[in-house]
Image: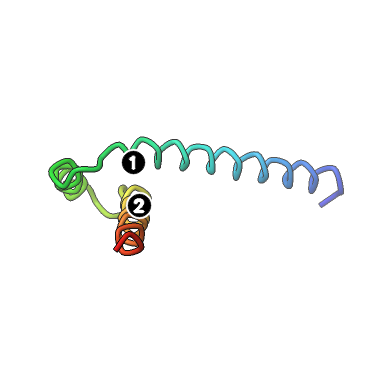
Amino acid sequence: MELRARLFVFRADLLLRAANRRRRRQLGAELAAYVSHAELNDLHALLDTYSDGQTHEIREILDRQQAGRLWTARLRG
């Protein structure tokens, strides 16, 4: 592959990664609005109606947010 093509692929990859980071950050911010147990239970019940392949990213974000909440709660004592 010639240098111009490699640079094009490299730049396209960088742009795609940046767009994915923005999209995940926005999704995380939207999911952070679900804070009560009832809201989270409803959201998990909705996610259970879809396959893990379709919801893995959302589940990962929710798990990360839950771990952060637990960590913060433990630090507060």
Compare residues 4 and 15 and report the one nearer the observer: 15
Mark 1 and mark 2: Cα distance apart in space: 7 Å
Instruction: Decide: few, some or many residues near mark 2? Use Cα within 10 Å; few <14, some 14-19, many ≥20.
Output: some
Quadrant that contains the C terminus: bottom left
35 vs 61, left or right, is: left
Compare residues 18 and 11 and report the one nearer the observer: 18
Please tell me the numbered disc located at residue 32.
1
Residue occupying image coordinates x 36% and y 63%:
75
Residue occupying image coordinates x 30% and y 55%:
66
- Picture coordinates of residue 52, whole percent (x, y): 28, 55
Farthest residue to the front: give it. Answer: 77
Mark 1 vs mark 2: which is more N-terminal?
Answer: 1
- Picture coordinates of residue 28, whole percent (x, y): 40, 42
Q: Which residue is mark 2?
A: 65
Q: Quadrant of residue 39?
A: top left
- Picture coordinates of residue 30, whole percent (x, y): 35, 35
Tell me how the rendering is colored: rainbow
Residue occupying image coordinates x 47% and y 41%:
25
